[in-house]
Amino acid sequence: MAFRTKIEQIARKNESRIVLALDFPFEKPENRDSLLSKAESVLNAVHPYLCAVKFNHHLVLPLGAFGGVEKLVERVHDYGLVAIMDCKVNDIGATNQVIAEYYYATGFDALIANPFIGWEEGLQPIFEVATRLQRGIILLTYMSHKGAGEGYGQTIIDSETGEKTHQYIAFAKKALALKADGVIVGATYPRKIEEVYQVLGEKVPIFSPGIGAQGGEIRSALKAGARYLIVGRSIVGAENPAESARQIQKFTRQ
Ligand code: XMP
């Protein structure tokens, strides 16, 4: 089953559009065993309120893909959720292919990639691996941080029409043409979500990070067209992560 169908089915079943960013602050390498237990305990508490879990370098660097992370991904699957690797693939094709093969071998259902690298000898090898293994690819379109506009917001000349457009609009069109499983647009830029939604409609779902800790708001992101909310510190760093996730879930149910 295609990744986007899988996550949509889970979201409906669990009545949740929350993708948990399972991120923790830096720990001294000698204390890394405690990271695995912390990650397990957050997952155990929060899984009923999620549709997916997103991993980042926060766990892959200290625990290793085939060390603790593979175990955590297995647990995500045992809970009936999907696992996304936020590796923002951004290298030459031959390297990207190896990155994708390893992460998919770890069990990840989808990877995040950066469309700035272009198709030939860039994204193409990752899409080929994903198609062969029936996994997903989500493309960055407009990142959530303050400096995002310097790259994703640039005015460019559309290579097909010769007209001026914005980089993120060109990336949204590329995601549609490539049948990507999703795009990322920061919740910190609801107007950009709206513009990207105008390009994609319901054909490619918008994943939106930046809720809470980065200043993005749940309601405005959803109203603008975000389908999934990526939330990390507001849940993981909360005194009661399950309660925090439950409160956010209420919004995504409406
Ligand atoms: P917080 O704690 O800010 O965590 O809720 C957000 C998580 O998402 C990652 N992040 C992004 N990932 N494109 C991405 O692919 C983005 O624009 C983006 N903004 C935040 C962040 O690294 C953390 O894991």
Image (spheres, helix red, strand yellow):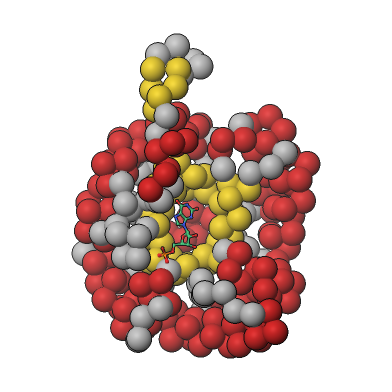
Residue at screen point 47% across, 83% down: 42
Q: Is residue 180 above or below residue 4?
A: above
Left or right? Give the position of 170 relative to 248. Answer: right
Left or right? Give the position of 123 relative to 9. Answer: right
Residue 57 in which image quadrant: bottom right
Left or right? Give the position of 134 relative to 14. Answer: right
Quarter occupied by the C terminus: bottom left
Residue at screen point 29% across, 57% down: 216
Return the residue nearer the eye: 68 or 198.
Answer: 68
Q: Position of residue 31 (x, y in %)?
A: 65, 86
Q: Is residue 7 above or below residue 241?
A: above
* Residue 119 in sight in this render: yes
**Residue, far top:** 162
Return the residue nearer the eye: 21 or 10.
Answer: 21
Q: Position of residue 215 (x, y in %)?
A: 30, 59
Q: Is residue 127 above or below residue 209?
A: above
Return the residue nearer the eye: 145 or 157.
Answer: 145
Return the residue nearer the eye: 239 or 185.
Answer: 239
Quarter occupied by the N terminus: bottom right
**Residue, far front:** 28
Residue at screen point 72% across, 53% down: 99
Residue at screen point 54% across, 55% down: 3
Q: Position of residue 218 (x, y in %)?
A: 26, 61
* Residue 128 in sight in this render: no
Q: Position of residue 189 (x, y in %)?
A: 31, 46
Total residue callouts:
0
